[in-house]
Amino acid sequence: MHIGLGFDTGGTYTDAVLMDMGTNKVLQKSKALTTRDDLATGIRNTVAGFDKEMLKSVVMVSLSSTLATNSIVEGKGCRVGLISVGEEFEMSIPVDHHITVNGGHDLSGNEVKGLDEAAAKDFLASLKDKVDGIAINSYLSVRNPEHELRLKKIAGDILDLPVVCGHELSSSLGYHERTVTSVMNSRLIPIIRDLMDSVKRVMSEYGIKAPLMIVKGDGSIMSESVALERPIETILSGPAASLIGAKMLTGKDDAIVMDMGGTTTDIGILRNGRPRLEKEGAMIGGRRTRVMAAEISTSGIGGDSRMVVNGSKFILGSLRVMPLCIAASKWPQMLPRLRTVAETASKFSPECLDVKNIVQDTEFFVKIKELKNMSLSNEDAALLELISEEPFSLKEAGAKLNIHPFSFNVGRMEELGMIQRIGLTPTDILHAEGSYTEYERSASEYAVRHNSRKMRMTEEEFIGFAKGKVVDKLAEVLLRKLFFEETDTFDMDALGHDLMRKAISGEQGRDYYCIIGLNKPLIGIGAPVSAYFPQIAEKFRAELLLPEHSEVGNAVGAVTGSVIESMEILLRPSAGQNALDDPSGILFAPFGRTEFEKLSEAEAYAVSEGGRYVTERAKKAGADHIEIHSRKIDKKVGLGEGYEGRILIETLITVTAVGKPRQFGISDD
């Protein structure tokens, strides 16, 4: 039996599966808490529960991860030196060292200015021991990459560092976006290397000898070596894996996929068996990139979302907190204190306070790390010392330190990652209900008892009310995603909001009500889906699919994806020859600019040379049994009223290589 091992390192949980690669049957599955300070620990904890004999038969390992996306959003990464050619960069993303040199091309691929190699050489020589990677971007290199390629060779001769060129990451126009993409890519190289090294250590510990793959943002997979060259392509890896996993587990090629995890809920669309891609390039950390990734809508609602009860006001926020049931499993000394809180009346906090600063008797804080050279108030320093070993609520901390609870600036320390908030979450609601009891259920029950009294409800009423709020929020983000898919805009006027509210709540207006139906099945991925998704499907009269193993759907997607390498080649007729049947023309491709006497010859060359190019990339990405597909799109315009026929403006040829991942000991080689 040939077995694949798939991992998904999410914001809250790390999932793993062992799958029979011949039948795509899940043999074993495992979940463990993600250990953010050392991802290898969470990965190791999932593997520890697997059959050791099965692990000996593993022929491929693949993982999806939120690491790249989170690192970009949090501004993490290595030191980067940037060479801009022919155009200043706006510096919208931090760069450690930067120079702009003469050079660049025009839209026809002609050199505008000669490349200033001397200035580039002096700059590169000055970077020794100052940077960890080099990014090179030349103006309109997608029309002619010769300047980038020359500088890459020079950089390789001077510095023993990773070097990435803009044209290697994207063939789309957009100098600024391409530069942002290449800088991000360079920053991510050591981060992805550390992740890969961590996984390989775990593989070595268990004697697993197999190729290591990682999921790209479009749902396909690539080898370890390619991931280290193009780590930017792993952004949105986790959500993309959920789409592939949903297809594998249900067999559906067209569906709406909702993946509810601990931290977020991700929504994507399967069309013709593939994730729908963001045509302009993925937006990460508020910046447009040129990375082709799945068009995913992400909302901060998950199993670990913070629930606040202030007086009789209920708030479901996007802040991720540690569920009380998980915390009490780790620190059982919390239980008697929670039991006391459960029977105690609580005053509400002023509604003028930011929700982050509302003091909750059932919320606790524990220290995660201490930042060097961080200036803290005396009150915050005292709190940090108190919670260094075990969690305390602000009320408890105030009493112990003789400091008013509102004096602690927990929001700031939380944003800096110094402390972890613990509180009531949807996971606790399910524990109190008894529908999911993986951790310390009594902690959740105490919190529900306390908050239900504040809202003058029975515990059963409060559980139903809280679950309803989660369902309504998920229904809202689902509709917003579908509205965007239909209209390509997020703008909603008062009428749109009213129709959406009526569709979700079922409310009858004075003269009308609203029903919205889904014409695609809804697939639920994630551990808590059975608790919430049936009600969502009922609201929208949708077919709901909750497949077996949906709780590890991302890990299934990680190990069942294909290797896909694609490139676009642009052909343009020579000036003044557009109306000819077979004019001369120019070919623009990542492998260079070439002139042809006939466009028919250019087309044949594009398919053959493009096929060779993507085949080599697919092999490097870890593919076997490669198939080549090409698609041709002609852009033509009419000659105007009174004239017959249309003239050719340009031809776009897309060449794609598709293969299955190479498996240990059974490849084509």
Image (cartoon, helix red, strand yellow):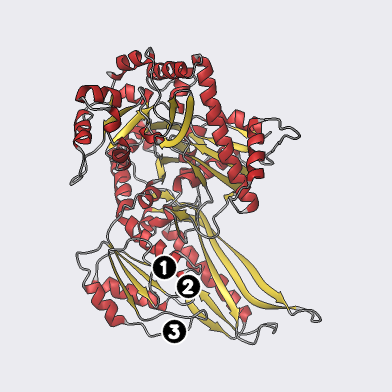
In this view, 641 is above or below 398: below
Amino acid type, residue under disc 1 in the picture:
Gly
Residue lying farthest right? Answer: 642
Q: Can residue 238 be seen in this view?
A: yes
Name the residue tied to disc 1: 166
In the image, residue 482 lies at what x, y percent?
62, 45
Judging depth in this view, the residue of 263 and 525 nearest the camera is 263
First reached walking from the N terminus: tag 3 or tag 1:
3
| In the image, residue 577 above or below residue 328 | below
Which residue does the numbered mark 3 point to in the structure image? 111
Tell which circle, 2 or 1, labels the residue nearer the N-terminal end.
Answer: 2
| Contact (Cβ within 8 Å) of mark 2 with mark 1 | yes
Amino acid carrying label 2: it is: Val
The crowd level at tag 2 (other Cα within 10 Å; few <14, some 14-19, many 20+) is: many
Give the quadrant of residue 571: bottom right
**Residue 334 placement, left or right of 389:** right
Would residue 54 appear left or right of 641 to someone viewing this image? left
The C terminus sits in image quarter: bottom left
Residue flagged by tag 3: what amino acid is it?
Glu
